[in-house]
Amino acid sequence: MIVQPVLIVAAALFSLGIYGILVRRNAVMVLLSIELILNSVNINFVLFDAMLSDTMMGGQIFSIFIITIAAAEVGIGLAIVLMLFRNRQTANINEFDLMKW
Amino acid sequence: MEILSNGLGLSAVVFLPIISALLILFIPKPYESVIKGVALLSSVVTFILSILVLLEFDFSKASQLQLGSKATWIESINANYEIGIDGISLPLLVLSTFISVLAIIYSLEHLPEPKSPKGFLALILVLETGMNGTFVALDLILFFVFFEIVLLPMYFMIGIWGDKTIRSVSGLKKEIETRLYASIKFFVFTLFGSAFMLLGFLGLYYRGNKTFSIPELIEIGSTGAFTGTFATLVFAVLFLGFAVKVPMWPLHTWLPDAHTAAPTVGSVLLAAILLKLGSYGFIRIAIPILPEQAKAWAPAIAILSAIGIIYGSLACLAQTDLKRLIAFSSVGHMGFVMLGIASLTSVGINAAIIGMVAHGVITGLLFFLTGSMSHTYHTRDMGRLGGNMKLLPKTGALLGFTAMASLGLPGLAGFWGEFMALLGAYNPLQGLNIVIFRSSMVAGAIGTVLTAGYLLWMLQRVNLGEPADEWKDKELHDADNYELAAWIPLVILTVLIGIFPKLIFGATNDAVVDLIFKAFGG
Amino acid sequence: MNLLAESKLSYGDGGVFAEYAWILVVLPFISALIITFFGKKLPYKGAEIALATIGSIFFYSSALLYKHITEGIVNEFFIVVGNIGTFDIEFGWVVDGLSIMMYFVVGTVALLVFIYATNYMKGEVRYTFFFTSLTLFAGSMLVLVSSPTLIQILIGWELVGVCSYLLIGHYWETKDNSSAAMKAFITNKIADIGLMIGIIILALNTGTLRISEILYQSTHDYEDIKNVAFVAGVLLFIGAMGKSAQFPLHVWLPDAMAGPTPVSALMHAATMVTAGVYLLARMFPFYEAMAHEALDIVMLFGVITLITAGLIAVVQDDLKKVLAYSTVSQLGYMVAAIGSGAYTASLFHLWTHAFFKALLFLGAGSVIHAVHTNSMLEMGGLRKYMPRTFITFIIGTVALAGLPPFAGFFSKDEILASLNHEGETTFLVISIIGAFVTAFYMTRAVALTFLGEYRGHGHPHESDKMMTVPLMFLAVFAIGAGWVNIPGVYTGFTTWVTTRANKINEYHPESFDYTALFSGLIAGLLGIGLGYFVYQLQGSADKGDKLIKVEPIWTVLENKYYLDHFYFKYLINPTKLTIANAVDRINTNFLDRIINSFGLAASFLGQIVYNNFDQKGIDKFLNASSTSTDSFGGKVKLLQTGKTQQYLMLFLAGVVTISLLILFII
Amino acid sequence: MEIYEIVTYFVLLLLLSTALRVVTTTNVIHAAVSLVFTLALTATLFLLLSAEFVALVLILVYIGAVIVLFLFGIMITRAPLGKNAELDNDKNKKAGAILAFAIFLLFSFILISGFSGEITIDQASSTQLLGEILLTRFVFPFEIVSFVLLAALIGGITLARKDDALINEDQI
């Protein structure tokens, strides 16, 4: 298998994720986009693992860790969104501008 | 790190505060939070830099001047920008940056009237530059400049933010505002001393191969080049300059007034760092450059220190003003420091340095506490206070702890300075009059009892008992988070130095032993 | 080190047990911290942590004692905490017979007192803080007794002083209590001058702060230390006089009864006040080898103390004060014993006294808890209401009076025997009179408190189990603690405490000294008999007092030999008022006046400077320079929209730009 | 061109299109379902790379658990189901697209200039080896990750739990 197309697709997935984060209004959608980014990283890790035929299998192990952390992140993220929704009656992240000057 | 070892690090420690102070001047007044942020940030960065310097410092060569640099400054008189630190100045430098951070943290929320964070914080930062600079300067002119830079901010701090009550002063016909009187007294007194000191520096310059460099002068001095009437005179004027700053009896009278009048942070910095400039001057300049004269003057210094210890403690017993009491206690504590220095032994001078650090930490904290209390109660009269433990439990508990530390409780920082100074004074340098030193030591030991006496009496009057009726319905605020953030580090430091004095001795011992060896031989 | 190597040949090194003995010292401090910060939130307000701590200390010290009895441990450990000049400042811990005995005493008495205090202090102010201080005290005491260096002794010495200050002044709302606390601290501080200078002299003439090294030098006839031995010995003893309340520095101890009773039991009877005796015992080889003359002074003061304090105890109406003076008197016995060269006898009395005096104090506490007064005149007849307290108190009394087979009998007898052996007939006679006085005042106390009719108000009742059970345990010790050292039968205690790095040369009786034994016993019985006759058979305290009232001695005793009066009139008040005020006046009227006349001119100049640099002037300049910053900031602040996505976008744009810069330009 | 490669390219293409749909669709449910497809295709890609364990974990954890969570999240936050023009922030669209594209170019450039070549896939199963390594060499990170999960669990509960006051408010 030639690696370059896969790498490009991974990069594309990453930038699509970025696009989602920047454009989406709904906080849940933003979280979805973050999953895309994490996934693109996973693809890269597994690909490099296969490419370098690493004896310690670092790539695969790291992607497993990333999946785990991603699960934790989603849990916390959704909990926060839930909290915000409960307090503000909306999941629109533009409404959350407490950081305003 | 290269950037630290070539002198840039030290220079940054010295000049970063004053640069930030200038920066603060350009921030318009309404942006208080920005001003505060910049001040805090710069002091914290300075502190971190000093910690980096500490880490970079090679403790196995603590007796050598390190991390310094030398650059031409005023060529015509051969005055150079020469800086560096060794084991003696290192603890004091770190103490200075540390206390400055705490002072600024405290000032974030507790500005004295008239509130003007811009001027006040800028002055603290200028002060910090002066203090740090004095500890790293290795050139007499540079030392003098930094030594004097300190005066101005303190003068303004007392004069503008000080105590506004009107008081009568003996010898003056008119009644005068406390802050006015105190600030002028402070300024004139110190300037008086340092003017003579400058004369001494010039004398050394002309006799000592036309150099202002302290290391070079030490080399010259240790070969016995300065002798006779000339040396006696030079030591006398240096003594005058440093003794005023310490302050030694009977040149101490500016101190109680300045402390009483100064705003909280002002008195903290005054007690914690400024007083140390004088005793540091003795260790860094007067003794190594003029060892023979130091030997001749040592008994006199010892006697004056002993008088200072007893006198300061007795004066404390007569005070009714809380801050004035603490101020007089400084006279006593600095007496121990000077007694250690006068012994001219490695034990005594080590004791003096740890005593300086401990006094900085403990009395700094005491002034924080009493300042905050006088702010809360709007009075410093101990006759009206009482039951502080009930009214302000946190402040009261800390006051109790600090008083214990201040009376030299073993296991806390203050102990080492006192005990080791007495140890040094019992066996002073060979050739010194042993009777004088041993009587001074006994006087010092009696002073510890008197110290315990006035501090416990103060605690009894202020902290214990039932609160007076006038406070019953008042809403009094106990220490808030800013205050605690400024105080707790000092408490921790007090305990740490107390149970592990190697924190200080580890840096100073080699340097002091080397200093004594160079000055007085084996 | 040579001396340790020497001793290791004959004794065990204690293995892991000794190596980890530092836990004993460190644990209380850690738990004191924990109690301070979390105590109030816990279900038992921090008492449980204090109890757990002291329980572990008790078990550890018991284990150490067991190991010491079976194999004999002598070992010491050092940690360098600083170097100053040529001195190493070291902390550490020493594990030998003497210190293990002290660990055990502290652990046992403290455990029982802590249990007692959980109930006694219930509902009192600052309950949590009380346990903090008590735990801190246990730690400080262990610092003191575990000390292998003089500097650590000094540290422990003053730390127990501070804990004593905190605990005596526990009820600081009243001025009397805080004054008592202050008095204790200052008196001790005065004595500490002696200790401090003594340590300085010893350190400078031996070049070390390690006790074992100093003792080694003194037993091996080093010249430097020999020259100063007498002075140093006396100075150290002055230190001990303060802590162990020897005449004339004993005045703080009776006042210290202002603290809660458990405190009196633990600190002012069993442990802290024995610190002076401990110091003398620790330095005993030094005294024995070099400072024999100093020992005579020690003995003299001990004997003076034991009789003078005993006599004052006779006239006290406050139950706790009777016990306090009794403690002073018993400390006099211990000090006198050390002075006569009877090392073991002194420590043996320390050991038994710790248990029975703690018992008596806790018993008194139980009584006071029930009747809410300290005055014996308002007690009486409590035998009926408080049977358990009564029985245990009687056991304590008998042990103190020195009747066989109770603990006090054996230890007091050994002290008398050694005085007899030394040929100090005068002192022996005084000590026997002291024994008589002891028995008399204790009988008086029992008669006034427990016998006769109840004279107070309300209905007293027996105390809670948490209070009586510790009493019973202590009663067991008060009976049995003496059996560990019976001449001719079993002398284990002698072996325990003489098992240490430096050899102890002392007289030790092989069998009972019957002269001393019987005279002491008869004195005790006489005292009890007389006390019973005077106070029980006469029916009331007034009548009894009248019977033995001999003017003007009685008045002198009631005024405690006018010592306090003397101190206040001629020492404290002149210093505090006259001299201090004079100094202050010198300061303001003389020194300042000189300065001010100089300053007058300067003041004029200063006015001008001040006016020109007044606040307004400065601010105007500052403001002018900063308006430009203001407008800039006004624009920059628009960037702060609070919208996360915009921030992120800007951030990413920055990332991309910087990456491009790095990739293509740099 | 072998069948293997054809399959790979096909998967990649599908992957791209579904991912694009995740971020462009105006229907929240569609977005979530597209993400399922994206992940499933990623798993397929992993299988092709003979990383079957990771593939299975991806399916189990992501598609099994995470997506369900998302759906719950969508429901609980009452996101409007069906088409919804409000879903995107139109102001950000242009800038976001440019930025995303720039990042894409940047990454592609770095990756392509950095890596090239061909992979030969050995067909042997790697799961056993993976397990051994995970529980020996990487056991410490493994434990730490489990702690992170625990912390996330507790944190999630604490955050999402309803306070009493709020419950009362709801009842009113």
Image (cartoon, grey):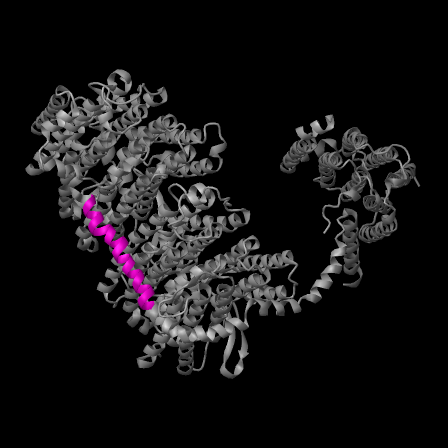
Q: Which residue is drawn at 23% across and 54% down?
A: C574
Of residue B395 and residue B428, the one placed in the foreground of this image is B395
Residue C563 position (above or below residue B139): above
Q: Residue at x 11, y 28 (%)?
A: C546
**B511 is within the stretch colored magenta:** no
Of residue C378 and residue C445, the one placed in the foreground of this image is C378
Of residue D75 and residue D13, the one placed in the foreground of this image is D75
Q: Which residue is drawn at 49% across and 35% down?
A: C38
- From the top left corner, tell me how far across and down residue C135 is, in percent: 38, 35
- Drawn side of residue C248 relative to residue B306, left or right: left
Question: In this picture, which residue range is highlighted in magenta?
Answer: C564-591
Q: Which residue is drawn at 33% across and 29% down?
A: C113
Which residue appears farthest toward the top when viewing the image?
C384
- Drawn side of residue C480 relative to residue C167, left or right: left
Residue B230 quadrant: bottom left
Let me know if residue D39 appears in the view. Answer: yes
Give the quarter of the figure containing the N terminus of chain B.
bottom right
Determine the main secondary structure of the stretch shown in magenta.
helix
Give the quarter of the figure containing the C terminus of chain B.
bottom left
- Drawn side of residue B10 relative to residue C65, left or right: right
- From the top left corner, tell me how far across and down residue B180 is, in percent: 46, 67
- From the top left corner, tell me how far across and down residue C531 is, in percent: 13, 24
Residue C200 position (above or below residue C404): below
Of residue B227 and residue B374, the one placed in the foreground of this image is B374
Which residue appears farthest toward the front when viewing the image?
B174
- Drawn side of residue D132 relative to residue C463, left or right: right
Let me know if residue C423 appears in the view. Answer: no
